[in-house]
Amino acid sequence: MNAKSRATNYTSAPLQRLLQLIDLLAGHELQGLEPGAIAKALGCAAPVTTRDLDNLRTAGWAELHPNGKTWRLTPHVIEISLKHAAALRAGRQDLNDVEQRYGRI
């Protein structure tokens, strides 16, 4: 069953916009993006962008650039990626251990 055929749609427009904002900020860690450019790219009003950026800041996902004008992602995103990679390595090791154990039979 795909997402469109579900009887109940749990999709939240504000949450989807936050996820789009995270994707938009990705790759702009050095210079950041100005709130006006973010609002334009997301097709929303400036106050909405300000609220979204503040929510990401509160959650540790975004920060105001030292230049005081632009916003960028924090290293939190990288920390999540590192945890993901560590979990994959651990899973790979578990599979290798099982393979070696059963390979001896």
Image (cartoon, rainbow, N blue to C red):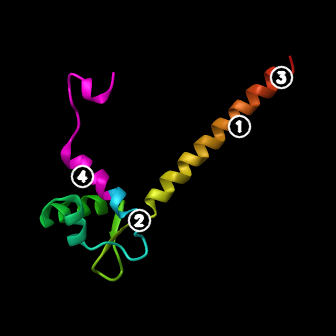
Task: Give the position of the N terminus as an image quadrant.
Answer: top left
Is 80 located above or below residue 3 in the figure? below
Mark 3: few, some, or many residues within 10 Å (few <14, many ≥20)?
Answer: few
Residue indicated by mark 1: 93
Left or right placement of residue 82 versus residue 44 in this view: right
Please report the residue visible at 44 percent of the width from the left and 57 percent of the height from the top.
Answer: 77
Residue indicated by mark 3: 103
Q: Earlier in the sequence, mark 4 or mark 3?
A: 4
Q: Nearer the viewer, mark 4 or mark 2?
A: 4
> What's drawn in magenta, residue-wise?
1-21
Q: Amino acid at mark 4?
A: Arg
Please report the residue visible at 64 percent of the width from the left and 36 percent of the height from the top.
Answer: 91
79 or 45, nearer to the observer: 45
Q: Earlier in the sequence, mark 4 or mark 2?
A: 4
Residue indicated by mark 2: 74
Q: Amino acid at mark 1?
A: Gln
Q: Earlier in the sequence, mark 2 or mark 3?
A: 2
Q: Amino acid at mark 2?
A: Thr
Q: Quick check: marks 1 and 2 in contact, CB under 8 Å? A: no
The answer for how far apart the CA atoms under marks 4 and 2 are is: 18 Å
- Disc 4 is placed on an element classified as helix
Mark 1: few, some, or many residues within 10 Å (few <14, many ≥20)?
Answer: few
